[in-house]
Amino acid sequence: MGNQHGSSTGNGNSDQRRSSAFDKSKQSSMSSKAYTGSLIKLFEKIEITSDAGNSHPGEISQSTFENVFHGPLHKFGKLMYRQMLNGHSNRDRITKEQFVKAGKEILKTFNESDQQKYYFKLFAAGKDVLTQEDALLMIQVSYALTLSASKFPYTKSDRDDRVFTAMVTSMFGIAEELNYESFVSWLKWNCPHMFCGVHNWVYLILTGSTLPSELETAPVPQLEGFVDGRYCLSMGMLWAMSATLPAAYTHGQTSETPANNPLITSYHLIMKLARLSRCQSWTMLYNSSDHGLSMNRFTHHVTSYHGPSIMLVSFEGRNLYCVANDTGWRDGPDKYGGEECMLLQISPVYRVIQSGEKMMLWNVHTRGLPMGIQIGKMSSSIVLSIPHEFDSVSHYGVACTLNKVEVWGCGGSSAKDAQTKQKQWEAKDVQRCAQRKLNLESKDWNENPDKQILDWAGIKGGHSYQRE
């Protein structure tokens, strides 16, 4: 009986597997047909832009293909053309069949591992290694494409160039070339979502529609009231951080994501189950240039904000650090911080220094312990320490001149609204207490309850106390 039961169950599982395989095959076929139609339409649109006319129907010349890509993307067009011809850059035309086949290969790279392989090969121009020049182009193009996919106007400043150079320095060290394994190792720790914006843009171009929000891994946050050049934060820096920081800083709270749902096994399940909210906006909480380098002012502006936030610390030596705090600022004698806390050095080298729990210490009131802000998981080797006076910063124990501090709230409008309401309640409570004290002082001393307490102690009332 037991064996019969087991056999029956096995047949059922087998039937389920065949049904599942059929469904996946059917879904894949449907996707393939949709992609084919979109790619053919795109090919025909590009084909009619040929300056020389349509002398070769069903084919696109290399120059026609590359001219679709303008400005900072022109070099990307050259690399894309070569990639779509599988490295045969000596061919000066691409057929409709080649274009559709290559486009479908790109559109199937949904997971980040496949994207990393594809775009490494693309930017390496068919080589087995990246040069520093290749890597810088990769970063610059990834930034430009991400802005375009996020519908931000393209902008790039000298500070962005410094960030991009810092990323290349971090990636290569003293080496002149980087193989795929070393590149992926660097990406995994320092910038895991570099190609998300690139793939979003490519998906948009090839299909004529935006990548479903369920698949957007690292959108660039909106900055409320941002003026480029006024803050430590720049657009290039914002892009780099959005490709590095955990989703808590760029997405809203979500009850179910691909990372924690074991049922998600395919693109179509992701489409149905992973309801990621749109990108959060970041809002300025504290800016030392406007509010002053002061612990009191810092405390006033960051308390009662319970969403995640990032703090930028600029100090001598062109050093710029980002402290990503996932739990809100907590004054006390104990270290705090959740799993998504992170400390990044942005310049002169872009790298993740530490990440994980209990990395933050902010002590304003507890006596007997160092006052100020300390960042670092090991008490014996604190990375950053800002004293209560806010007049310097200790960097691995070396005192440095503190230039600027910024705190951006990453919890969206709900976290900022909650902070505003709390601040308003606190202001009203202070006003009520002041009014109550004023009323008590203005009353007849003989009717004041404090007089009776003093009388019981044998002290005569009035402002001149005399004991009997």
Image (cartoon, rainbow, N blue to C red):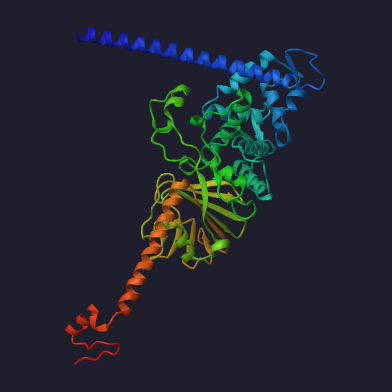
Asked if residue 427 is positioned above or below residue 48 in the image, the reply reads below
Could you say which is closer to the camera, residue 252 or residue 437? 437
Could you say which is closer to the camera, residue 28 or residue 114? 28
Residue at the farthest left position: 456
Query: Is 374 positioned to the left or the right of 348 in the image?
Result: left
Query: Is 88 positioned to the left or the right of 401 in the image?
Result: right
In the picture, the quarter occupied by the C terminus is bottom left
Residue 225: image location, x then y, percent? 58, 51
Residue at image point 41% right, 37% down: 254
Examine the image and state in which quarter residue 73 appears: top right
Residue 149: image location, x then y, percent? 60, 34
Residue at image point 65% right, 47% down: 160
Asked if residue 30 is positioned above or below residue 165 in the image, the reply reads above
Q: How many marks?
A: 0
Residue at image point 29% right, 90% down: 464
In the picture, the quarter occupied by the N terminus is top left
Residue 85 seen in the figure: no
Residue 386: image location, x then y, percent? 49, 62
Residue 262 seen in the figure: yes
Residue 108: image location, x then y, percent? 55, 21
Could you say which is closer to the camera, residue 323 or residue 253? 253
Asked if residue 440 is positioned above or below residue 144 in the image, the reply reads below
Asked if residue 152 is positioned above or below residue 272 in the image, the reply reads below
Residue at image point 73% right, 22% down: 89
